[in-house]
């Protein structure tokens, strides 16, 4: 037996398989026919373009793999060079500074008020 949620009764009610899988008359989004062309121009398929077009650029993945997979003892978040070290040290400084600020604020808040 199949069930669906009834918006009127606000509970589950018995239903057919088609109604249970397509609730409230929803139809699948996938269209079986191709859309009509918008203009009279012919369109090119992605396979029509050569793979070496200038807008694709150079594939940098092999170079980055060499950098990040090198066994030099550095953690991966520091292998990017100076920018990575700068970001790491800034983050650590802000973290330590924030911790000290919170501890000072807690110390001040724990003292009784002077009248």
Image (cartoon, rainbow, N blue to C red):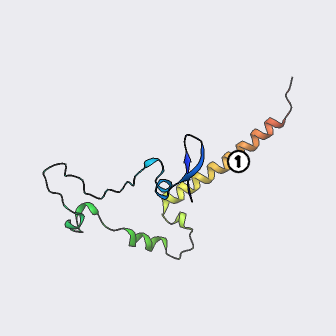
Image side of residue 28 versus residue 109, left or right: left
Image side of residue 49 versus residue 67, left or right: left
Q: Position of residue 105 (x, y in %)?
A: 75, 39
Q: Residue at x 39, y 73 (%)?
A: 62
User: For residue 34, what is the image quadrant?
Assistant: bottom left
Look at the image and tell me in which quarter the C terminus lies. Answer: top right
45 w.r.t. 93: above or below? below
Q: Position of residue 38 (x, y in %)?
A: 19, 48
Q: Residue at x 79, y 36 (%)?
A: 108
Disc 1 target residue: 99
44, 21: nearer the viewer: 21
Q: Position of residue 9 (x, y in %)?
A: 59, 41
User: How many numbered badges does the structure rendering display?
Assistant: 1
**SS state under label 1:** helix
Q: Residue at x 53, y 59 (%)?
A: 85
Q: Position of residue 73 (x, y in %)?
A: 57, 73
109 w.r.t. 19: above or below? above
């Amino acid at each position: 037996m199949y069930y669906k949620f009834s918006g009127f009764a606000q509970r589950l009610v018995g239903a057919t398989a088609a109604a249970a899988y397509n609730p409230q008359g929803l139809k699948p989004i996938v269209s079986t026919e191709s859309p009509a062309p918008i203009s009279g121009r012919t369109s090119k398929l992605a396979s029509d373009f050569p793979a070496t077009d200038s807008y694709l650029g150079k594939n940098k993945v092999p170079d980055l793999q060499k950098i990040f997979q090198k066994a030099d003892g550095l953690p991966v978040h520091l292998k990017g060079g100076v920018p990575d070290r700068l970001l790491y040290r800034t983050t650590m400084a802000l973290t330590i500074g924030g911790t000290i600020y919170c501890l000072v604020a807690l110390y001040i808040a724990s003292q009784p008020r002077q009248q």
